[in-house]
Amino acid sequence: MKLDATTFDQLFRNARSHNEWQDKPVPDALLTEIHDLMKWGPTSANCWPLRVVFVKSAAAKARLIPTLMEGNRAKVQAAPVTAILGMDMDFPDLLPKFFPHTDAKSWFTGNTELIRSTAFRNSSLQGAYLMLAARGLGLDCGPMSGFDAAQVNAEFFAGTNIEANFICSIGYGDASKLFPRSPRPDFAEVCKIV
């Protein structure tokens, strides 16, 4: 069933990356709802490498903000929530649970390059699902990659085999502060059918 135009507008055409936020909290129940939607998005072999830390408290923001590029600090400070989207390099250990019909864990044994590329690719996909789920629930997103990954890992993933992929502020954007939308390419500029 094709979705209606209003839904596509909310998810894509009218959705914007926000840098300025309304002073309106995002309840924990809504973050759970984001997860409960985005978890259905496909990953290769249902590998599920994404791990998310939702930074909401002042104390957690104080730990995150010094890891960011200067231009991203005010955005994160003002955002009700900023998600750190990490990739778990130990995801193969959970494949017997998440992909039980074959021995998928063995595909990764001793192959750190395959583990890393699979974790990066699939956690990036899952991060996009998270943003679409948030938009579908009436929230706005502000994804960014301007941060020191080693510092983020030390602050939020110490003692684990999880590494930061990207971060994304979540809340109710202030549309009055948006700059004009940047151009997008036409089909023929970036696609071909062979």
Image: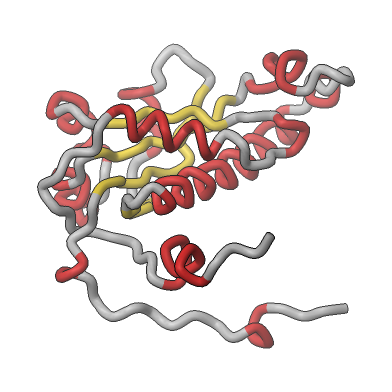
Horizontally, residue 122 falls left or right of residue 155, namely right
> How is this picture coloured?
secondary structure
- The residue lying toward the viewer, choosing from 123 and 33, is 33
Up-down relation of residue 8 to residue 42 (above or below): below
Q: Quadrant of the N terminus?
A: bottom right
- The residue lying toward the viewer, choosing from 170 and 136, is 136
The residue lying at 64 percent from left, 22 percent from top is: 91
Tell me where residue 43 appears, x and y as whole percent. Answer: 69, 39
State how many labels appear: 0
Horizontally, residue 8 falls left or right of residue 71, namely right
The residue lying at 14 percent from left, 47 percent from top is: 78
Q: Quadrant of the C terminus?
A: bottom right
Horizontally, residue 44 falls left or right of residue 27, namely right
Q: Quadrant of residue 97?
A: top right
Horizontally, residue 31 falls left or right of residue 5, namely left
Tell me where residue 193 appears, x and y as whole percent. Answer: 82, 79
Up-down relation of residue 44 to residue 21 (above or below): above
- The residue lying toward the viewer, choosing from 151 and 29, is 29
The residue lying at 77 percent from left, 27 percent from top is: 111
Up-down relation of residue 28 to residue 12 (above or below): above
Tell me where residue 56 appears, x and y as whole percent. Answer: 22, 31
The residue lying at 79 percent from left, 25 percent from top is: 108
Tell me where residue 130 appears, x and y as whole percent. Answer: 47, 43
